[in-house]
Amino acid sequence: KASLANMYGIEAGKIALERSQVRSVKDFAKIMVDGHSAGLAELTTLSTAAMVTPPSALDNDHMGKLDALRKASVEDFDDVYIDQQTETHENTLNLMKDFASNGKDQGLQAFASKMAPTVEQHLTTVKALDQSDADDVTESPSKT
């Protein structure tokens, strides 16, 4: 699940870097691409050591989220991206906390413990974006 979240975070961030019109959203997306790329690389190494085969492709749920980002109108893009990132980081934070407490492999458990604060910071940042006008900047004047 953590590998899928990282893979999705990278791809969603790339889409946001291309499509967002808002500097703060693009800055967050860049952090997501860089952070999730590093996390995925470390997790892949640890998974291999633990004899766990990480997924090589996204599942249907994550592919659907990426499709929604690609299909979102210019006016709705930032809102869709921020909402998806909020949900994904909430789920990932719960996963990391649970695995840090209950994981069976020491290396993966240590990874979860180490990553939980980073995921929590990402969640705090994306929630702040949601509370700001970042997802309203490209709103169509006809919607106001």
Image (cartoon, rainbow, N blue to C red):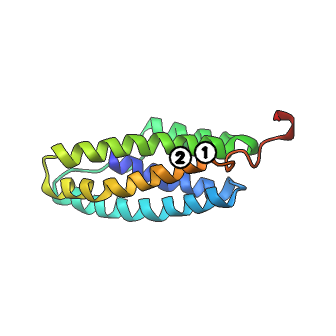
The relative height of residue 23 versus residue 1 in the rendered view (above or below) is below
Q: Position of residue 37 (x, y in %)?
A: 42, 62
Q: Is residue 39 toward the left or the right of residue 30 in the image?
A: left
Near mark 1 (Cα within 10 A), the count class, few <14, some 14-19 or many ≥20, is few
Q: Residue furthest right?
A: 142
Q: Position of residue 137 (x, y in %)?
A: 75, 49
Mark 2 lies on residue: 127
**x and y, in percent, of residue 95 in the image:** 30, 43
At 53% across and 36% down in the image, what residue appears?
64
> On screen, 26 above or below 98?
below
Residue type, label 2 = Lys
Above or below for 122 versus 92: below
Residue at horizontal 24%, vertical 55%?
113
**Badge 2: residue crowd in 10 Å (few <14, some 14–19, many ≥20):** some
Q: Which residue is denoted by mark 1 in the rendering?
A: 131
Q: Position of residue 84 (x, y in %)?
A: 53, 41
Q: Quadrant of the N terminus?
A: top left
Task: Identify the disc placed on residue 51.
Answer: none
Q: Residue at x 68, y 40 (%)?
A: 72
Q: CA distance from mark 2 to mark 1?
A: 6 Å
Q: Residue at x 43, y 63 (%)?
A: 35
- The answer to whether marks 2 and 1 mark residues whose Cβ atoms lie closer than 8 Å is yes
| Residue toward you, 107 or 136 | 136
| Amino acid beneath label 1 | Gln
- Find numbered disc 2 in the image and state the secondary structure of the residue it sits on: helix
